[in-house]
Amino acid sequence: MLVPQFKSGTIMDIVHTPSQKTTHSSSRLKVEVVGNGQKMMQEQKGQESEATIPGSSRPKIDVQQMNFFYGSNQALFKVNLTIPENRVTAFIGPSGCGKSTLLRCVNRLNDLVLGSRVEGKILIDGQDIYRPEVDITDLRTRVGMVFQKVNPFPKSIYQNVAYGPMLQKISSRSALDEIVEKSLQGAGLWEEVKDRLHASALGISGGQQQRLCIARALAVNPDILLMDEPCSALDPISTGKIEELLHSLKEQLTIVIVTHNMQQAARVSDYTGFFLLGELIEYDDTKKIFTNPGDRRTEDYVTGRFG
Amino acid sequence: MQAVSLKKFFDSGTLFVWMCGAGLALSLLMIGGLLALIFINGMGYFWPKDLVQFTLHDGSYVLGEVTGHEVIHDSVNADSPEGKGRIQLKVGNRDLYGLDFRWIDESHIQAQSTPTDVVFLERREWGNFYGRPHRVMQGDSVVASGHQEATTALFPLIDRANEIHEDIHYLERSVIGDINHEIEAQRLSLRALELEGRANQSEVATREQEVAVLQSRYEAEADKLRVLYTQLEEYSVVLEDVNGTTKELAVGQIIRMLQPNAMGVGEKVWAYLGNVWTVLSEEPREANTEGGIFPAIFGTVLMVLIMSIAVVPFGVLAAVYLKEYATQGALVRIVRIAVNNLAGVPSIVFGVFGLGFFVYAVGGSIDALFFPEALPNPTFGTGGMLWASLTLALMTVPVVIVATEEGLSAVPREYREGSLALGATKLESLLRVVIPCAMPGILTGLILAISRATGEVAPLMLTGVVKLAPSMPLDGTFPFLHLDRKFMHLGFHIYDVGFQSPNVEAAKPMVYVTTLILVGVVIILNLAAISIRNRMRRKYAGSTI
């Protein structure tokens, strides 16, 4: 009864179509930080031509039979889903449906919650991240996260972006400078802040702060970026900028975004999962979810009949 | 109708607001009144008052500073509802009169005047002298006679005597002090060798030789000192009080001479500033009732600084563990309650603990281990700067713990998660984001701790404060900072001068001055901490652009 009703065929398609970028991700991880910055630039340039070509992809994140409990309160019920590499996957659903919980399971940020408990598996590149020998800090550098509440640290713009690399003991000034520049460019913020890198990050606008958070996440060179309602506190123009950013970023990253804004999900995502009361109701191609959903509850939600 | 509007008045909360306002106003009034009282009395002490000469009906004269006025209680009756007044005079000349202060009934006064030729002499003993110099003597020969001439001749002699005193002070404190220190060091090293059983003939001989050399150096310096002391006796002055009683005094006994009645406002202001500087910079004289209170100011500030250095790491570590690492459960709740209660324990209890634990147990062990040669004289096994500071740190650590915990709770969860999501460990998040953001809270704790510790006296009396410290805890002798030394403290100074002094009336102004300076020290220390905190707040709470 709790089995999520997603079209297995679609998932199988995603999983089994030959990937053009299978080696990309793993090789990218090994590239030197500085070298990668340049590579990122090249990819951004090349990306515009490729962006519209619907590529297929190998699975990046595989959630298997996931149950999650806050104490005695179960928040996720046997969730199964596969998130493809280099795509944007959106989670939609009413508040309290478990979409953020699932997102925070992917970088194990839920470990912090007292009395929380996980059953099932999450595989990233085929490796279960809940194995005891997994180094959580390693995992979190591979899985970046952008939060609903814009949270730049009360430090300078530069120090915010350099925070992650400095944790990895990169202390050479020139290397840090380069990472900061590339990351800010990757987040589309460089032009706006390049003259005041050492000013407080709290002094720039909300939209800029959120892009700074994205830059900060990019600086540690992740292959997955989790976004928990990243635009809910932003005005439409800032939101538009971040949505554009997602299009360019997905060339190098696998993006999972939780959003309450259905237009946003429709605009930015390739795949969409609909959650309700801790269950994954339907998971499919975004176009299909919004035009021809397979489940009555999905249809009700996306057409605004409840939610 | 009336009832309805009255009910409305109550319901609107206007009455409540007024009561709150009145409560606040009353509190501010009391604090303001207290500070004003201390300020006026304290600052008034420095002003060179006019010397008033009263002629009494019996033909005698009285000269002094007017220090008070009151209505004689018994004189108030139906005939004279105003009652009769009396005036309190500081007449000085303790050696002649026995008492510094005298009450004079207003009804006994025939006339009053402020003669310009009277002088005020500040002496090294017997308090102030009020009167006129009669003649100045060099040995048995008269150098100058007559009030005016004697006064004029006296000024340069006093300056010379003060220079000699400075030389004496330097010789006694620095030169002879150092020699004594070295002799003591030789004695201790010899004793240490004896204790270890390695005191052979040659070692003993070397040291005895060293001591003999030092001893001869000491003799030479002591001769110089004797010469200086005879120089002080060279000139003397015959003083005459207002009734013609004379008194001979060596000029070396005089610190300062003023003619307050002849001084203009500018000169008085100058003398006023000089008095302020004297109190701030000099050492006390005459059972602390005269001179300055510099050692007490220095001791207070140094103790508070050492306490701060001890209390902040302690309190922050404890709070971080309680808040961030300990499993939140019954045990942590009990610990937290205990910590809060610790803040309410009477300070003398901490004093007793400091004496038993720090002084006797820890200090005694340190002496036995590291300073056995000095025993039975204790080094750390007696009250001192270190133990007093640590006792106060222990007393104030709950305040820092509570404030730090509050500060940590106020750090947004998003900062922690943001940091962790970038691959930081918990420790890295704490050190790089959370604790810097909690710094304003930590500093608030420090401010409260400083305020409490600066004014605390009771525990210090058991752990190292003294009425008069022979040497400062910080000086030019290696290792410069002597944490084992006893020290003076403003709070204790107030108690000592105000209540333990042989001459309470004469010490009263000193009590106010010391109180004023204690309040000033608290305010300055707090302002320093507050300005650091505000800078942190600006840094962590908003735009700097």
Image: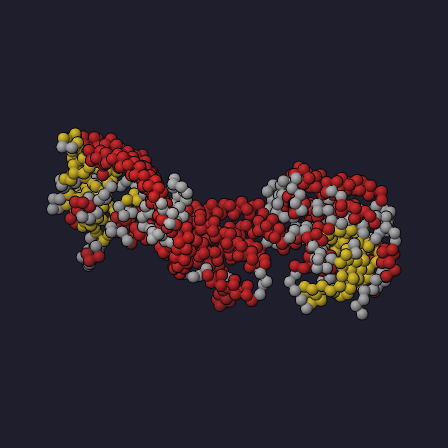
The front one of B436 and B356 is B356
Residue beneath the point at 52% across and 46% down = B534
For image coordinates 38% across by 47% down, the residue present is B198
Determine the image quadrant of residue B117. top left
> Seen in the image, is A246 located left or right of residue B429?
right
As drawn, the residue found furthest toward the left would be: B58
Residue furthest to the bottom in view is: A1
Query: Residue B535: x, y in percent?
Result: 53, 45
Q: Nearer the viewer, residue B263 or B532?
A: B532
Q: Which residue is drawn at 77% across and 41% down?
A: A39
Q: Which residue lies furthest to the front in this view?
A: B201
Residue drawn 55% across the image and 65% down it:
B331
- Image coordinates for residue B529, horizontal then vertical, percent: 48, 47
Q: How is the image coloured?
A: secondary structure
Query: Could one spot residue A91 in this view of the protein?
Result: no
Q: Is residue B279 above or below residue B498?
A: above
Q: Work out whether residue A121 can be spotted.
A: yes
Pinpoint residue B107: horizontal percent, then vertical percent. 16, 49
On the picture, is B514 further left or further right than A218? left
